[in-house]
Image (cartoon, helix red, strand yellow):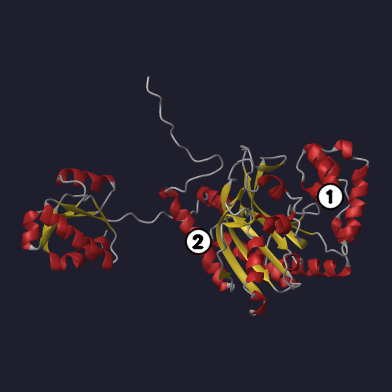
Amino acid sequence: MAKKSKQFQTPSGMHDILPSEQYLWQHFYKVAEEISAYYNFQRIDTPVLEFADLFRKGTGQGTDIVAKEMYTLRTRGGDALTLKPEGTPSIVRAYIQHGMKKWTSPVKLYYIAPMFRHDRPQRGRFRQFYQFGLETIGEDDPARDAEILHAFFVIFGRLRLKNVVAEINSIGCSSCRPKYIKTLKEHYRYRLRQVCKDCRGKYKDNPLRLLDCEEEKCARVKTETPHILDYLCVDCNAHFKKVLEMLDSIGIPYLLNPYLVRGLEYYTRTVFEIFEEQISPDVKEGDKVTSTKGPVVKRLAIGSGGRYDNLVKFLGGKDTPAVGGALGMERILEAVARSKNKPLKPAEPGVFIVQLGDAAKKRAFMLFEEFRKARIPVREAFGRESISSQLKLANKFKTNIAVIIGQKEALDKVAIIREMDTGSQETIPQDKLIKEVARRLRNK
């Protein structure tokens, strides 16, 4: 018995973006790029592969991304390269490498790019996923923190996404954070038996990450922890107060979350996460759920970010403040696709060119180009010889008009216009064909 050949599939956690989905992606690109340009962000594209040490040093050796999730390969020359797991270290590397410090400050950049993390695939979370990000480098003004969130919410508005809320916190700076971490460790010191194994590891290496854990038993301990906002220095407290005042003034919906710390080591001061909320009785894997007396509220994380004032210096540049954020495109487009107000699919071409014979096919090729110049989308079936099979295809695509050219029409320099809904036909000189088709399409 012959061995059945292997049927290839996408690798686990990877996904195809099919033609039927592309209109949603193109809609997002258009909206995001228009808003970015309006707020004076310029596009930057960095390589998919970067030196692994960029993320080990920039993202942080103690983060889950670096410790567990990076795709790293060794080149023939011995270099360790990593498929980009997040965007910010690459942006900062480019800022330093290309001397952007000399540009007009602040430098405002945006990117749309694939990222790669060997994470457990969940709803809307893939191992290859796409992010849209905004980065502002060179100013520490709280208005820049608010501007990132504001731009994101303008995009949500243009995408007609509702029930979106930001959670926000401040994790202080290198002056005030050590005192809080000391207090936090003291709080957990006698409670380590009450938390999960991962949290016991975080206690030694990265105690702030204790506040990240969603395990039920860890959450109980977390609710008793002191709040970092009570330990902010004067400067960090004033900065965070101004950020909140700015968000209030422009009407950005937010919730204070004193346990929000984010999972990346480079963050300072402001950190945020953005959620889309749904009220539904159904709960799927990957949903963050809030219990209520009524229906279950599902919270889908769609964006995050914060300030990273030390990263430029840490990666070899001069001391430079910065803030940024990123949106997960798959999750946002999932929400857009669910929306009653999602964008309409582009209209299908209303014209189908039908041809019969070699001379007619050559004329149809020329006619196809004439329609393109007139910006009239058309379909064709050059590989089919039968008129009936071509007309069946035109019906399948729900085409309004068929333009039929046979050998006689090609010689006489005319074409037959067929109304697909009524079957009525009319012979038109080819030099008047484009105008006549355009007129009929306008009247549909």
Q: Residues within 10 Å of mark 1 (few under 14, many from 20)?
A: some
Q: Which residue is at 77% across, 54% downward?
A: 261
Q: Is residue 111 left or right of residue 413?
A: right
Mark 1 belongs to which amino acid? Pro
CA distance separating discs 1 and 2: 38 Å
- Residue 47 seen in render: yes
276 vs 24, nearest the viewer: 24
Q: Residues within 10 Å of mark 2 (few under 14, many from 20)?
A: some
Q: Which residue is at 16% across, 44% downward?
A: 388
Quadrant in which residue 273 is drawn: bottom right
Q: Which mark is residue 397?
A: none
Coordinates of residue 360 in the picture (x, y in percent): 13, 56
Q: Is residue 225 left or right of residue 61?
A: right
Quadrant in which residue 344 is drawn: bottom left
Q: Which mark is residue 207?
A: 1
Q: Which residue is at 68% across, 65% downward?
A: 251
Identify residue for label 2: 29
- Which sits earlier in the primary sequence, circle 1 or circle 2? 2
Q: Which residue is at 15% across, 46% downward?
A: 387
117 vs 25, nearest the viewer: 117
Q: Is residue 281 left or right of residue 10?
A: right
**Quarter containing the C terminus:** bottom left
Is 386 drawn above or below residue 111 in the view shown? above
Coordinates of residue 343 in the picture (x, y in percent): 46, 56
Coordinates of residue 378 in the picture (x, y in percent): 27, 57
Q: Is residue 271 left or right of residue 10?
A: right
